[in-house]
Image: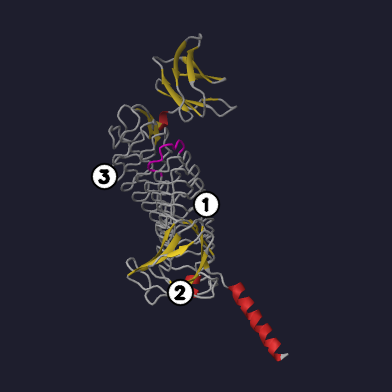
Amino acid sequence: MKKLFILLFIQLALCCTSFATNYLTFTAEEDNSEFSIRDHNIKSKIFYSLDNGKTWNKLTAQLVNLAKGEQALLKGEEPDEKPTLDNYSSFRMTGAIAASGSVMSLIDGNGESKTIPYAKCFYKLFYNCYSLTQAPELPATTLKKECYSEMFSGCSSLTQTPKLPATTLEEECYLVMFSGCTSLTQAPELPATTLAVSCYQSMFYNCTSLTKAPELPATTLAEWCYNSMFDGCTSLTKAPELPATTLAKLCYGCMFFDCTSLTKAPELPATTLAELCYLSMFSGCSNLTQAPELPATTLAKSCYNYMFLDCTSLTKAPELPAPKLEKDCYSYMFYGCKNLSRIKVAFIDWDWETGTSLWVTDVAKNGTFICPKDLPEIYGETHIPDGWTVIREEDLSTEAVAATEGTTVHTSGLTIFVCNTDADIEVYEVGGKLIGKARTMSGEAQITVSQSGIYLVKAGAQTLKVAL
């Protein structure tokens, strides 16, 4: 009886142990798939089993061959030397291999831990593993600096990401994590509201198949936190909401750089800016037609620098309500926006060295520049675009208003401006003679008549009366 009890106890212990282990597992999806470990100036302590854990062999640079459907279990322990930029271990793969189980078994032996023990723990672990078709579980809720940095960079066969449950991040924890994953179509949920310096920097850089961004709920940002996060995501059609009101240096820098499928920018509610906070945020977004409102009235150094560089579909700039410039605040902001034809500003003095250097280079040849009466009328790529009409804000008339759809007519001198309409406009004399037409772009149109008088402005089904 005693012997039977001991045997039952041993069986129960084995069952519990088997249930508790969650080894990192490689499954071959085609014949002659292979894997090995490459140690870069570091000695890893990783073992593999081809017989479901009965026997274990040390993983080396020698390739391990798997037939289709065959599995390898992997486990390990912390290396004697911790990874650095030059000292790290990474897998090599050929064929097609799906990973499953917990990556934590490489450092705790069984995959139970949810705490990453040291910085750069999994640095470049699957770097350029073109054969990896599925990522393993990443269950850690306690992270360390750069723990997942470049972990899956270049994994061009990866189509989905693992869950990332951590809610408090560490510096550069996801830095360049999925860079170059060109088959990735779906990003993981990112629930963290407490961010860290460069935590998401370049996380999805050049993920050219990514169509949807994850929600980003944080309201207080950290330096570089979203820098280049979706840079080169040419299939991204919709940006996530960005509710943050507390910004930090370069927090949004290059965030959507070259996102050529993006047509509408997210709202940017912050009224207190930080140095370089929006640097090149939408540079190269060639299909962007709608810019966000920019409500801040107090600027910061280089805050909007290069923000809409080469946004060639943008026709109307967001209003710029700040009364005073800061160093490079608007420099290069609309450079290359070749269809931009309307800008409205509130500042009353130019200082090209500190504020508007080359900000309107290569914009539309004709347009409207609305500004306060005290702003000196100076033309050129650092001031008012050559060939544009200057309208002083104090001279605008808002007498004619169509109450039904909110279409408004403003006048300045002999120029009529129609706003908030999708229809092209026609202008008639009171007697009914057509004297001119104008095309509407981004909800606005303008036309200049030859003399003062009373005119009828037709915009779609609406006809408005205006006196000049």
Residue corresponding to mark 1: 214
- SS category of the residue bearing label 2: strand
What is the C-alpha distance between the residues marked 2 and 1?
40 Å
**Quarter of the C terminus within the rendering:** top left
Front-most of residues 281 and 49: 49
**Residue type, mark 3 in image:** Glu
Front-most of residues 318 and 85: 85
Q: Is residue 422 above or below residue 434?
A: below
Front-most of residues 88 and 413: 88
Q: Residue furthest bottom?
A: 2
- SS category of the residue bearing label 3: loop
Q: Is residue 430 magenta?
A: no
Q: Is residue 103 left or right of residue 339?
A: right
Dominant secondary structure, magenta: loop
Residue 154 rendering spot, x and y as whole percentages: 40, 54
**Residue 249 lies in what quarter of the image?**
bottom left
- SS category of the residue bearing label 1: loop
Q: Is residue 284 magenta?
A: yes
Between tags 1 and 3, which lies in front? 1
**Which label is found at residue 379?**
none
Q: Residues within 10 Å of mark 1 (few under 14, many from 20)?
A: some
> Between disc 2 and disc 1, whose residue precedes?
2
What is the C-alpha distance between the residues marked 1 and 3?
39 Å
Pointer 2 with pointer 1, Cβ within 8 A:
no
Residue corresponding to mark 2: 57
What is the C-alpha distance between the residues marked 2 and 3?
66 Å
